[in-house]
Image (tube, grey):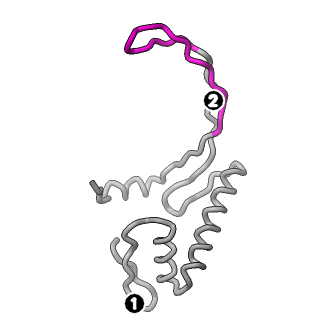
């Protein structure tokens, strides 16, 4: 997908890099709005995603998938070995914690198989 067609048949190339500024510029050009307004729209969208996740929701991110928070369970203290010296050590317990997660949709996973990879 190298170019996007708009309603007035003007072809607008996708950004070279994907930063907030470049995406806002692209959005501004496609929709005929100012770059400032486009950046504000992107900021609002990302703030909504963040708010939803912080409220415990699974928030859809377009056709890519869903972002959410997951509880990583606590671990008990246990014995382990230093692989270099063979010395026995105690690995400390860890408390349960919340971590961000992203689940990709099946369709997006299939599309990634066709993706170009930069070296």
Q: Quadrant of residue 12?
A: bottom left
- Give yes or no for residue 10 being in the magenta stretch: no
Q: Quadrant of residue 74?
A: top right
**Left-right relation of 29 to 50:** left
Percent across and percent down for residue 62 are: 53, 63
**Left-right relation of 64 to 47:** left
Q: Residue farthest to the left?
A: 119
Q: Are marks 2 and 1 in contact (CB under 8 Å)?
A: no
Q: Name the residue located 48 percent from the left edge and 77 percent from the top edge.
A: 25
Residue denoted by label 2: 73
Q: Name the residue located 65 percent from the left edge and 56 percent from the top edge.
A: 50
Label 2 CA crowd tier, 10 Å (few <14, some 14–19, many 20+): few
- Image: magenta residue range: 78-98
Secondary structure at badge 1 equals loop
Q: Name the residue located 61 percent from the left edge and 33 percent from the top edge.
A: 72
Assign the N terminus to one quadrant of the image.
bottom left
- Distance CA(mark 2)–CA(mark 1): 53 Å
Percent across and percent down for residue 39 are: 57, 73
- Tag 1 or tag 2, which sits nearer the N-term? 1
Residue denoted by label 1: 9
Q: Quadrant of residue 2?
A: bottom left
Label 1 CA crowd tier, 10 Å (few <14, some 14–19, many 20+): few
Q: Name the residue located 46 percent from the left edge and 77 percent from the top edge.
A: 26
**Left-right relation of 11 to 59:** left
């Amino acid at each position: 997908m190298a170019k996007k067609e708009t309603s007035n048949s003007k072809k607008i190339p996708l950004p070279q890099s994907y930063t907030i500024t470049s995406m806002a510029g692209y959005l501004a050009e496609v929709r005929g709005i100012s770059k400032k307004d486009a950046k504000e729209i992107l900021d609002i969208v990302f703030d909504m995603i963040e708010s939803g996740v912080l409220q415990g929701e699974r928030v859809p991110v377009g056709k890519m998938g869903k972002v959410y928070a997951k509880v990583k369970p606590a671990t008990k203290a246990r014995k382990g070995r230093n692989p270099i010296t063979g010395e026995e050590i105690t690995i400390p317990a860890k408390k349960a914690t919340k971590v961000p997660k992203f689940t990709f949709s099946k369709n997006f996973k299939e599309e990634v198989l066709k993706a170009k990879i930069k070296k």
